[in-house]
Amino acid sequence: QLSFFYTCLASTPNFILLFADDLGFGDLGCYGHPSSLTPNLDRLAAGGLRFTEFYCTSPVCSPSRASLLTGRYQTRSGIYPGVLYPGSRGGLPLNETTIAEVLKPLGYATAAMGKWHLGVGANGKFLLTKQGFDQYLGIPYSHDMNLTCFPPDVKCFGLCDVGTVTAPLMHNEVIKQQPVDFINLERAYRDFTTSFIAASAKKKQPFFLYYPSHHMTTLEKTGVINNTLVFFTSDNGPELMRMSRGGNSGPLKRGKGHHV
Ligand SMILES: *[C@@H]1O[C@H](CO)[C@@H](O)[C@H](O)[C@H]1NC(C)=O
Ligand SMILES: *[C@@H]1O[C@H](CO)[C@@H](O)[C@H](O)[C@H]1NC(C)=O
Ligand SMILES: *[C@@H]1O[C@H](CO)[C@@H](O)[C@H](O)[C@H]1NC(C)=O
């Protein structure tokens, strides 16, 4: 594994960072789940390095994502201790340096799709395009958050009036769909990934793809080549309060929302 790792770093490797939401230690076949079918992830694990001890910095979403993307504890960026909501005015401070902002000056194409959850802000000032990502397709917070509108007064297809706003699908800084067509969302993400990777490969440009999935079903075929380092992890543990529907922590005791 180490030689593979170094071979990668000798040139400009592509990076794919797959980030699952509320996935438990015991949810995948490769971590011992007896009936959960995750063949693509299991294959990835079998051909790579599988960690059995790995800590995220927070048991909830926004702080965990803030530190993953910046390499800094969430207490430093202020995305702490709770999560952001659709009506939150704040977001990951723009002076924080994300992985995308490190790679972009080195010539990388950068894209993200899925759940951002690090702020929208007035006029989209905290969206990904302001944090080093060339392209984004996704829902800027949790897909089950139906709350108020974006601050300060952005009309979300007129739905603000009713006090409840269904989650939007955004392309870069523009609302593409609202409410989101969840049935076809995986396909939209897959198409977005495929065209991003194909375009980068054609231009011979290294790329960084950040894919924080809202929910894990199957990992789509990404056309992974030998010069790509794929890293898969989860933002926090399973949502144990939802019992079996919230995921499985395997032999571990706690899950999402637990600090110890
Ligand atoms: C960003 O700006 C804030 C406010 O000025 C400051 O407290 C913080 O340390 C800055 N962060 C970085 C990473 O420079
Ligand atoms: C969000 O709001 C829509 C429209 O009011 C409703 O159909 C849906 O069930 C809500 N979803 C959640 C998770 O509350
Ligand atoms: C990737 O590397 C393996 C092992 O060296 C080799 O068998 C395979 O053909 C390579 N695949 C591509 C697409 O280059």
Image: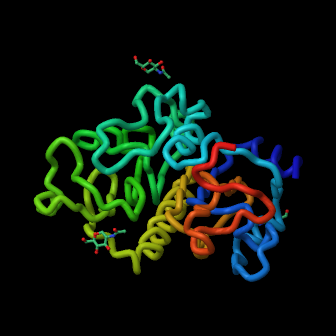
Left or right: where does residue 254 sit relative to residue 69? right
Q: Position of residue 28 (x, y in %)?
A: 72, 70
Residue depicted at 49% across the width and 45% down the height: 62
Percent coordinates x, y for residue 98 in the rendering = 52, 36
Q: Left or right of 82: which side holds 139?
A: left
Quadrant containing the C terminus is top right
User: x and y percent of residue 227 in the render?
Assistant: 71, 54
Relative vertical location of residue 101 with respect to residue 112 in this rendering, above or below: above
* Residue 207 visible in the current orientation: no
Please say if 192 is above or below 150: below
Residue at 38% in and 53% down: 140
Please tell me whether residue 237 is drawn above or below residue 84 in the rendered image: below
Point out the quarter of the image occupied by ligand 3. Answer: bottom right
Find residue 157 and report its horizontal and vertical position in percent: 15, 62
Residue 48 visible, this orientation: yes
- What colouring method underlies this structural image? rainbow
In-front residue for pair 129/73? 73
**Vertical side of 47 occupied by 92: above or below:** above
Residue 91 vs residue 194, the one in the foreground:
91
Q: How many numbered marks appear?
A: 0
Task: State which quadrant residue 42 falls in.
Answer: bottom right
The residue at the point 77 percent across, 65 percent down is 250
